[in-house]
Image (cartoon, rainbow, N blue to C red):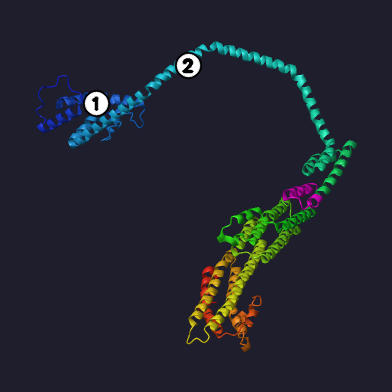
Amino acid sequence: AQAIVLVQPTNPPTNPPTHRTPTTHKLFVCVMARTGVVTAPPSTATVAHHDAAADPRRRRVGSMLNTFYRIENASEDPAAAALVQVEGTLDAQSFDARKHFDDMVASGHLKELVGQKKELDLEIQNLDSEMQGLVYKNYKELLKATDVIKQMNFCIDGMDPDLNSLQEAVDRLTTCEHRVEDGVAKRSNLIDGMLKQQRLCRKLQMVFSVPATLKSCLDRGEYGRAVETYCCSVDFLRQYKHIASFRKVLEEAEQKMTQIGSALEMRLRSPYLFVGEAVNSSLTLLDMGKDRHQVLSEYLRGRRAHLKSSLEHCFCKEPLGIFVCRQAGSDPSQQDLHSPESIALNSICWRLNDTYILPLTDAVEGFYKLQEGRDAVEDEQVMPPEFVRERLKEMLARLSESIQANPVSVRVLVSCMHSIRDTMRRLHELMPSLMNDLMTAFFFRIATTTLRSEFREVAVAIVDALIELHGKCKGLQESCAGAPGNVGLDEVLEEIARTEHSILMMIFARLTKCQPLHTMLGIDTANCQKLVRELGGLLAMLHLVLAEVSLRYVGSFDPPDPRRFDPSLRDLELSGVPRLEEVESLDWNSLYALALVRIGRHMETKGLPKSWAIAAQLFPEVAGQTP
């Protein structure tokens, strides 16, 4: 900012002028003393005289500064520049300190003037402090840089002789290099020609050794290498087959390749060939130009033979060692998991997952790999689904027979089925529609068969409990014969209640046990609903067992069969329940007849609704239906 300059006369008057008012004089002296500009107030005449003398000089200095710093928009006319004035701006180009000061005194903004002065002093001090800090901070670095520069100058000045000697050595090396190149140029051209001849001779040697190489590959079974060797040389041999030597080599090579093709076809049909080797053999035959449909058929034929042998191995009777070890340290609360039947089923499913389902998936992926980069015809697109359908139907049929022949607990069965489902995920991604149809039907069939088997066991247990109740009622009646009143009636009612409770507990426990069958079906809503309808029929069958026992016990009266009046009960078969014929030969006992009536009535009014309520909690599809 421009400074306020007030020039005092050399010999200021001792007395202040009489025309200045005391108030103005006092204010002027105070401002000048606080700002440090003057130490004594000048007179009015002195100020006016100084302004008149300094005005041309100020304009001349301002013009010179504008010219030196090339300030933009600066007026070339000093008189016009003097007229341009920005009030209140210290950094303006035409700032007039006297006029600015007079205006501030006249307007009474002395506090602003003092404040600006303090702000400028503070900013100057801050700038000085920052500059001193920068100088102190970088002083050592500047000294170090100066020393380094001096040392570098000294070193460079002393290296001139070494640089000159180095340049001379480089020149001598260049001269020797040119002399050596001139000396070996002729021999290098000769060597290049001989190397080309050597490479050509090696190629000819490889061409003439093709039949021997093919024979070696045939003996060792390296069919892929044989095809690669043949493909690399056959174009050259066919191009120059008019030369007798090359024609002979071509004939021998084609003869060997014919033998290799026959060997590959026989190898492809082998049941002991793994999937990767079968795919490589098929690719080799395709590279040889064999018919693609025939190659694919032979590939599936060999995979079919391999899977059949694997399937026989899966259903062998020898259990896996891992499950036998688990049986040795089994928990008494989990005896059903370690029974011989459970170990056999776990071993079968383990082998199926490892040696049948995974190789089947690899075979399908290998078939699609053989079709990569080739246009598939309609017959070839049908081959993989039919192949998978046949193999899975055979496997599932054998598995169903094994489950029916050796029943296991529900949780063991569901665990094994889940393991098979998890292993088939890759195959499901390849053929989702086919796998959904096959596996949902299989799981539903297994769930239905298991559910019927479980509830048939409950029906057998109910018949046994009712026959046992007859013996107890007969014994109580004989022991109380001739006794007055209702002696022994409480014992009979207690036995009836105990038998009724045991029947209900058997039904409830079997419902809980069969609940995992619902999870085995997954999200197949249609089959889940079918399973629930089957469950309702089986619950009705259990209650019909009571009616059947009553009918057979009072057979001489020939009462009507309830299945004649309810069409939904006609399909329920009770012929598979043993010991029903034994009921007909039981002695007549009035207490037992009353017990059957009481149990039947309680089961009708309380047992069946309670059983259906528990089924609704275990099977969501039961909710909203009536028994």
Measure how far apart labels 1 and 2 are at the Cα level.
57 Å
Nearer the observer, 227 or 516: 516
Nearer the observer, 203 or 340: 340
Q: Quadrant of residue 249?
A: top right
Residue 283 belongs to magenta span: yes
Q: Quadrant of residue 67?
A: top left
* Image spot of residue 5 (x, y percent): 23, 26
* Relative side of 153 to 112, left or right: right
Viewer-nearest of discs 1 and 2: 2
For this orientation, the residue located farthest to the bottom is 557
Amino acid bearing label 1: Asp
Query: In the rendered view, would you say 590 is above or below 434?
Result: below
Residue at mark 1 = 55
Amino acid bearing label 2: Met
Say which element carries label 2: helix
Q: How many marks?
A: 2
Q: Quadrant of residue 309?
A: bottom right
For this orientation, the residue located farthest to the right is 244
* Relative side of 212 to 117, left or right: right
Residue at mark 2 = 152
Residue 576 belongs to magenta span: no
* Image spot of residue 110 (x, y percent): 19, 35
Q: Quadrant of the N terminus?
A: top left
Q: Which residues are magenta?
A: 265-291
Task: Please say whether residue 95 is visible from this viewpoint.
Answer: no
Query: In the rendered view, would you say 79 is above or below 220?
Result: above
Task: Please say whether residue 225 is visible from this viewpoint.
Answer: yes
Nearer the observer, 32 or 292: 292
Graded by Cα atoms within 10 Å as few (under 14), some (14 to 19) or many (20 or more), the crowding at tag 1 reads few
